[in-house]
Structures are given as C-alpha cells and as structure tokens.
Amino acid sequence: MQPSANTIVLAMQHRVLEYDGSWYGLLTLVFEVYEHKYQVSAIVNRLKEEIQSDFFAQNAMVTTNWQKAERVAKGLKAKVGAGSLEELYEAYLSEVKGVEMLILKAIQYYFSMQVAGNKNYAHPQIIEIKKIVKSVSRERHRMKAFVRFQRLSDDIYFAIVEPDFNVLPLIVKHFKERYADQRWIIYDVKRDYGISYDLCEVNEVVFGAENTGIDQKNIVTGWHEEEAFYGKLWNLYFKSVNIKERKNTKLHVQHVPKRYWKYLNEKL
Amino acid sequence: MSERALEKLAVLADAAKYDVSCSSSGSDRKNKNKGLGNTGAGICHTYTEDGRCVSLLKILLTNYCIYDCAYCVSRRSNDIKRAAFTVQEVVDLTINFYRRNYIEGLFLSSGIFKDPDYTMERLVRIAKKLRNEHNFNGYIHLKTIPGASQELIYEAGLYADRLSINLEIPTTSGLKLLAPEKDHKQMARPMDYIKNTIIQTKEEKKIIRSTPKFVPAGQSTQMIIGAAKESDWQIIHAAQHFYKAYHLKRVYYSGYVPISNDTRLPALGTAVPMVRENRLYQTDWLLRFYKFEASEILNPTNPLLDLDIDPKLSWALRNMHQFPVDINQASYEMILRVPGIGVTSAQKIIAARKFSKLRIVHLEKIGISLNKAKYFITCQGYQQQFVHMQADKIKHYILSQSASKYIKCNPQQIQLF
Ligand code: SF4
C-alpha cells in the first residue's frame, strides 16, 4: 500500500534527534527544534545509546554549536531566571532515561508562557523535573558529606566516590572553596573520571588504561605515614559519640544508606 | 600526636555526647587568603547509630570538674576515668579531621577545672590558634563557661561562630535541687552581654565594614527533658522567653539519659523520653516558623503535650472553629496552620494558585499530607464533609489511618508536620 499524502507530511515533521551527550549539545538541539519546527519523537544520546530508528520518523544528528546553545541559555535565563536553567542542567546530569525529552518539553512550556512557568508546581513536566532535580540535589549533598579524603605520601588528599548521578561537576565549587590550601582529587569510579585541584584550579582527570583498578587497596599503599592514625581516631570518635540508650538503626540507615558505607571509614 | 590521644578521645568524646547541639549553620565565614575551610554549608558528615547528625568534632577539653551537677556524667562525685587534652592536641585533631572532610568544625566544651576563667582562657586559646595560626575558617562552637570574665567572653566571640550556655534545668526549683552550685542569673548574665555585643557589632558594621565578626551564628542553649519534674509548659515557656529576651538561634531539648542512681533523678534503666523530646522540637518549630505563641499550644491549666499526635494537629483539633481553610483564598499564615501542610508546601500553594484554582490532585502533587489536611480544608471541587464532626472523632480517624507512624518514634525526623 502506498502511504497517503498525510503520512508523508507527518513523517517529514517527526524526528529522532541525536546529540553528542553534552549539555551544550542538548541546548543546541533545542535551538534546532525551534529553527526547523521539528516534531521530536525521541532524543538519542550518541555516547550511550544505539541509534534507534522509527518507521515514521527521520533521524537527524545535531552538531553541537556553542553559539546556538548560548542563545538558548540566554533566552531561558531571561524567561525563567538562572536558577531554573541550573535546574534543567541538574536534571540533565541525572542521566535518567528520557530526561532529554523532558527537558525539551519543559523548555517549550517555559517559552510558551507569558508568566514565569517555572513556578507552576502543578504542571506535570515541571513536577517531573523538580523530582529529578531533588534526587540529584540529594546526591550532590551526600557527596559533600560523604567524601572521605585519605592523605597520600605526596600530600594529595584522595577520595573515591560512586555517586548515583553524575554530580562531580556540581561539587567542584564547594571543594575548591573549602580546601583551597591542599591538593585533592575526587574520583568517580563508576564513570571513571575525577576532579583534581592543584592549589590553583580544578581539572578533570582520567586515569588511563595502565592505571585501571583504582581501589581502596592500592590507595592504602600510597598513604601518608599519619593516615592510619587519623583514620583510627575518626573511627573511634564515631563509636564514642553513640548513645546506646537511644539506638535507632532504622533512622541511621535512612540517613546513611548502606551503598555509601564502603567508602566511609567510620563504617569499616 | 601520640597513641595516648586515642584514649583521651574515647573519654572526652563520650562525655561530650549528651550535648545534642550539632548545628554548624548560621554563619557564612568565607575562606580567606587561600586558607583552610569555610562555613555555611551545615553538612552532616555522618550519623550516629542512634540517628543523630555528626557535623562537628564535639569533645570536652577535660572532664575534670569542680562542680557536682547531679544530671552530669562529669560531676566531681562520679567515679569515672578523667582525662584532659592539651591545646595542641585539640588543634591537631580539628585540622586533621577537617582536611579529610570528616567534619564542619569544632564544638568544644569543658568541665570546669580550677576556676571558670582558667577554663575559658584555654578554650579561647584553642579557637585563637585555629584562626590565627592555621588560617582555619571552619565552624567553631565554644561553650561559654558560667562565671568567666567578660573580657574572655568577648575574645571567645571574636573567634567562635557560636557560643552557648546550657540552661539544662528550666525551673529554679529544679536547678536548686539538682545543681545547687548553679543559678540561672549566672547563665543569663553572659547571654545578655553576648546579645548586646552582637547587636552593637552589627551596628558598627554598617558604618565600618571591617569591624570584626562577633559570634556570627549567634547563641544557643540546651534543656534536659525529664530530669527534674518540669512540665512541657514550663519548658516551652522558658524557651520562648529565651528566644525573645536573648535572641537565641536555637534551643535544644535533650531527653535525659539515666546515668546515676541518685534518688533525685529517674532511676537507671528508665527509658529516654524520646517521643516527648520530639513533641517539644515540633512545638519549638511552631514558635519559630509557624508564627505560633507558646500560650496557644500550652498553658498552666493545659501543661502537657499530647504524645500521640503532633502539637499542630492537637491545636487544630482544639480550634475547629477556625476551619475549614479555603486553599485558594486563605492567607499564607492560615494555610501554615493546617495540619499536614509544612512551610515549603504552603509556599508552593501560594505560588501555584496564581496559575489555576487548586484541586486535590494539585495538592497531592505539591506533596502535602492529605490524610491529615483533608479534615481542615476546602479547595476547587472539594467540599468539606468532615467539618461537623467531633474533634476526637477526627483524631481517631487520623490515628487509625497512620497508626504505625505515630506509634513508632522518630526523634530526629526532618519533616516535622
Ligand atoms: S559544671 Fe558542667 S561539667 Fe561540671 S558537673 Fe556541672 S554540667 Fe557537668
């Protein structure tokens, strides 16, 4: 059967858009959607997913363009403020499946509104975004709390983390401002990259293939001579502040979920 | 630092743990000249096995004490192991814990050895060393030793983010019975001095921007619950008085943990009054964030809090004539008073109702607790059918629907209503 004229028109408008997985890539994609009046049926992160094809839709690859992305960012800032733009960025860092589509829809909603749509706490997409942002935020907060530096013999303070979401970009500022006079590295072993501060600036670091297998065991071999002692003191402190008459394991585990224990030396 | 420090830490952290304050917020000390640390984040770096936040290295400088307060483990008549840190040991512990991201800072208290000034002078010296020699900008909370000279308290205020004096026992008669060497005036005097100096510093700062900080995170205090026979009304009344008269940032309530077989006190093995403690915290929140007056919740003829329901619900049930509240019309203040609606939800309601008239589905999404709120509100498409009902019937319904939540005790819950 020949497709009718109607389906052909539909097929021309519906797109599966692919982008490079970066935040600027996603903003560029938004720009293109407005420019070409695309109807988007799916967004594909080239870094992660196999390219899908949809019988009724055409695929298009978005080329990341810094200027286009900036224009979208600027427009959003003017419409809903820097805070809401930051929210979308945090939602993006969640890496939750389908989050790109959600971000696109939220942006379309914001631009369609006369008033500040980001305050509409009853709108379905906004609720969804806020929910994701809340979990990302919680994870960021946990990383600020649960990073445990170990002092190495070359005076670098080293920490391993395994966050649920990609939150390292969100904690750079906090650690840089706080630990301005010590060199440190926070390494995400799940995503295999880290952030490293050299007393001047923070850079991303990736330990190449020859260094794979960063784990607690090979860090211990590089410890500063005092590290074991302070680790022991901290462990002892943790045990000494407990009031056994008030024991409440359920509450404890709720605050410090078990999946974080492996990097908390007071829990060893 | 030597191995001996381990032993000291075990003794002096154990003795400090009954002070429940752990807050490290309320100050915004920036990291100066690429030094170490800053404050403002108020992070809990871990939680004790009883579920309390661990934010600060909370220790005593020493547990030797010349006083004999019955409710305190460090009292001089108690036969326990005694220890004392040196100034340098406290400094080293603080810096090394901080650099490893274990803590937000130091909370240093002490037994009173020799005399108040001798003790206070050492606390001040530690804070000064941290700030001046180590360029440490993390949080410092010092205990103000009652009876210490004003000069020392002033100096402490220059280095500390927070100062506190614990009232411990809110009634004069209770204090006389359990800590006859202490009196409330002795505690109120430095509180008053600190309050006035904070105000004065703020005024000076308006004119001379470089005026040094003075206790930027303010003062706090703690009361022990259930050691003397004080009522909830007496406790809350005292709390409100101290909030107003001395501009306290926080009042902490610490359920008495039996530590002695002194007959003036609850016997060893008596349960810690954790539910009561939780109800007092909720009441405290009502005073600070929900614009309630202490007398609306408790009074001399009605001196005890309900243990089975929270104080806001309890207030609402006694004041059914103020309900139902129309979600789409009522003032922010009134929406705040609805059981099941917290501060954030109330703010969201005010923001969201500008877009459309709110219905039950919206309220669900905003996250209010409808199983309580539904008895007290009307909104678009929702008529109040319970309003003619007796208060005790509503209470019964709410309790039967959420039995588990109210029976189990959760003393540190963040979502208070
Ligand atoms: S003065 Fe303080 S440390 Fe000494 S016994 Fe009294 S409460 Fe305890």
Image (cartoon, coloured by chain):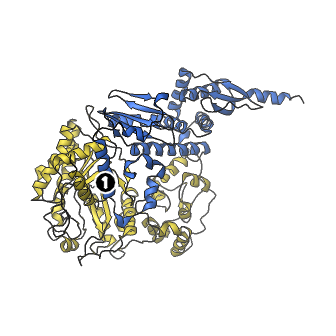
Chain colours: A blue, B yellow
**Picture coordinates of residue B381, whole percent (x, y):** 64, 58
Considering only vertical position in the picture, is B349 above or below A11? below
Q: Quadrant of ligand 1?
A: bottom left
**Picture coordinates of residue B170, whole percent (x, y):** 25, 68
**Picture coordinates of residue B23, whole percent (x, y):** 32, 52
From the viewer's side, name the closer residue of B206 and A65.
Answer: A65
Q: Amino acid at mark 1?
A: Leu
Is any part of residue A169 visible from this angle? Answer: yes
Give the residue at x 55% y 36%.
A92
Q: Count numbered badges in the picture.
A: 1
Q: Which residue is under mark 1? A: A236
Task: Examine the image and state in which quarter residue A50 appears.
Answer: top right
Considering only vertical position in the picture, is B291 above or below B40? below
Secondary structure found at label 1: helix
Considering only vertical position in the picture, is B313 above or below B105? below
From the viewer's side, name the closer residue of B391 and A129.
Answer: A129
Give the residue at x 62% y 38%.
A98
Number of other residues with Cα within 10 Å of mark 1, as a class: few under 14, some 14 to 19, many 20 or more: some
Task: Examine the image and state in which quarter residue B402 appears.
Answer: bottom right
In the image as oriented, which residue stretches furthest toward the right? A1
Is any part of residue B414 visible from this angle? Answer: no
